[in-house]
Amino acid sequence: MKHNDKQTLLKISGLQKHYGSTAAIADVSLELREGELLTFLGPSGSGKTTVLMSIAGFVQPSAGSIDLAGKPLLPLEPYQRNIGMVFQSYALFPHMTVAKNVAYPLSIRRMPKAQIEEKVARVLELVGLPQHANRLPSELSGGQQQRVALARAIVFEPRLLLMDEPLAALDKKLRAKMQMEIMRLHRELGVSIIYVTHDQEEALVMSDRIAVFNHGRIDQIGTPSELYDAPKTRFVADFIGESNLFDGKIQTIGADGVWCALPCGATIRLAEANAARKDGSIVVAVRPERIRVHHASHEPACENVLPAVVSDVAYLGQARKYLVRTATGTEIVALEQLAVQGQRTFEIGEPVVVSWRASDTREVNS
Amino acid sequence: MKPGCIWRTLRGAVCLLVALYMLVPIAIVVVISFSSGQFLSFPPPGFSLQWYRALNDPAWTSSLATSVEVMIPAALLSTCLGLGAALMLRREGLPGAPLIRGILLSPLVIPVIITGAAFYSVFRPLGLHGTVLGLIVAHTVLCIPYALTTITSSLAMVDWRIAQASASLGARPFTTFRRVTFPSISSGVISSFLFSLVVSFDEVVVSMFVSGPDARPVTVQMWSNIRGDVDPTIAALASVLFVFALLILLLEAIFGRGEATEQ
C-alpha cells in the first residue's frame, strides 16, 4: 500500500434503517481508513447496499451517525457530499457523449473549460478510453461503459468512492480484468473505496478489509486472510470459501486440546475453544482443503482421523473434490490439490481415511 | 406451396383488407372534396376546386383559427402538467399514487358527454362558458391522460439511477432535471405535445358543451354544418384535417423517436 497513514476517513456509528417493522440495517458501526479499499460482502437483503445508499445520501437512516473526515454527513443533501459513486447499471447519461458524461461533475462545479478538457482527457487516458471521447454510451460495450462511469466518478477527485456491485453485469473474464483495473486505480489515486459485492471471490481478491453483512449487521470485519483463516461465525465460515460445519458437544478440555463429540458418535479434536455454550454445544468449521484423503489402510499421524467411503468426486482441473461419508453418516467435503502428476485418486464407493489437524479445526459462533 | 408460404400470403391478405377497410372511406371523402356537383355523392360528376374555395368563408376560417388558438395552449399545458405528474408519480412511497393516477386518467374512461355536461355546469357560473379560455381548460383536462401515459412510458425506459448519479456528481435537483432527466425523455415530451395537439383539434363532444358563438372550434362548426345543408365543403375540410393529422404523425415519427443528443 502506498498510503500508510491510517487515519479514519469515514466513521459509521449505530446506523439503523427500518422499513415498517423490518430492519434493513439492524445495527452497523464501522470505520474506514484513509486510502483503504473496504468491501461490503453479503447476500442480497443483508443491508450492505442500504448502508452504501445511506453514505451516498439516497437513504435516510432511522438512527445512528455517519462522519466523513470528522464532519457529520447525514445533514447534507446527496449533491453536497462530494462522494463519487459507481452504479451496477452504470447510470451513464444516455444523451451525452463519453466526454460530456465525464465533464459533467466538473461543469457543475463551474470549472474553466480548458481545465475541464484537460482533466477529462487525463482521466479517460487513465481508464484506457482516450479514443472513445465522442461516442455515445449506447455505442460502447458493458465493460467500456463501466470504465466511463468510473472515470466520471473519480474526475472530480472525491476522497471517497462508493461502488455498488459495479461488475455484476459483466462476464467472468471481463470481471477479472476490471477487478485488476480498479485495484490499479485505487493504488494510483490513493482514493478510499467502499465496494459492495455478493461475490466472495471478488471480495477476497480486491479488498484491504472485508465487512461481512448478515441480516442487517456486520458479522465480522477484517482482512481477507483473517476472515478466511479465522471465521468467527458459522455464516462467515460458510459464505467465504467453503466449510465443513459440524454441530458437536464438548466432552473434555485438556492441556493439549478440546475433545468434541459429533452427533454421529465420532470424536474430534480442536486446538482451542472459547465460545461454547453452557450445555457444551459447539459449532466446528474445517476448510475442505485442510482435509486429506488417504487409502483405507493408511494410518495418518494426525489428531483427527475418520474412516469413510467416497460418495462423490468432482474434477476441478487444478484440484479434485471428494464428498465422503463416514460410517455413521456424516458428510465431509475434502479438496485435494493436484500438484503432482500421477497422484493417487479414489473412486466412488472406495473406502478411505480422512484426516485433518486439530489446529485446522476452528470453533465458530452459530 | 409450402405451409409457411400459405400463411404469409394469408397474413398479407388480412393486412391488406384491414388497411383498405380503414383507408377507403378517407379516400372517398378526399375524392368527393374535388366534386363539381352540389351534393355529397359518389362518384362525383366532375372535378372542381369550388369546395376548397368555399372554405374561405369567415365561418370556417374563424373556427379554424379558434381551434388553433385552443390546441396550442392546451397541448403545452397538458404536456407540462403531464410531465410534472409523471415525475411525481414515479417517486417511491408517494401516498395515494394509484388514486392520483386514476383521477388524472379518468377522462379516458368517463363518457365524454358526462365530462362535457360537467364542464358546462361548472363553467357557466364562472363565466368561462363560450370563451377560448374555457375551451383551453377543458381540452387540457382531456389531453392530460395522453400526456401522462406517453411521458410515463418514456420515463420507464430511462434508468432512474441517472438522477441519483447526477446528484452524486454534485448537481442540484433542478440542474439534474434540466441537464439529465428532461433531455433523456425529450422524445416522449415531444410525442405528448403532438398527441395533445391532435386530441384537442379532433375533440367535438366536450367542445359542443363549452363553446359559444364567440369561441367555436372547427369540429363544432362541422357538426352544425352537417346537421344543416350537407354540401361537399365538409369533405374539403375533412381532407384538409386529414393532411394536418398526417403531418403531425410524420413529425412524431421524426422527432418523437429519435434521441436528442447534447453535443
Image (tube, coloured by chain):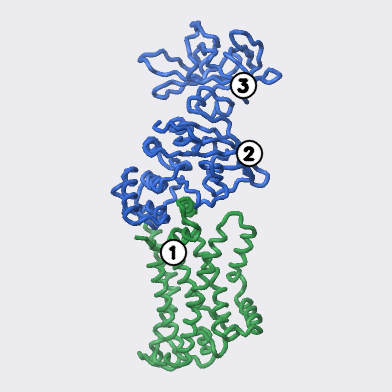
Chain colours: A blue, B green
- Above or below, A138 against A298 in this view is below
Expressed as whole percent of the image width and height from the top left, the position of residue A188 reads 36, 37
Residue at 54% across, 33% down: A212
Expressed as whole percent of the image width and height from the top left, the position of residue A320 reads 44, 20
Instruction: Decide if residue A222 is in sight here.
Output: yes
Foreground residue among B172 and B156: B172
- Considering the numbered disc 3 on the image, is that residue within a helix, a strand or a loop? strand
Q: Amino acid at mark 1?
A: Ser
Outermost residue toward the right in this view:
A279
Expressed as whole percent of the image width and height from the top left, the position of residue A80 reads 50, 51
Q: Chain of mark 1?
A: B
* Disc 3/disc 1 C-alpha distance (Å): 60 Å
The residue at which mark 3 appears reads as A283
The residue at which mark 1 appears reads as B186
The crowding category of the residue bearing disc 3, from other C-alpha atoms within 10 Å (few below 14, some 14 to 19, many at least 20), is many
Residue at 57% across, 15% down: A326
Image quarter (top left, top right, bottom left or bottom right) of the C terminus of chain A: top right
Q: Amino acid at mark 2?
A: Ala
Image quarter (top left, top right, bottom left or bottom right) of the N terminus of chain A: top left
**Left or right: A265, with B251 as reference point:** right
Foreground residue among B160 and A353: B160
Q: Which label belongs to residue A26? A: 2
**Left or right: A325, with B68 as reference point:** right
- Considering the numbered disc 2 on the image, is that residue within a helix, a strand or a loop? strand
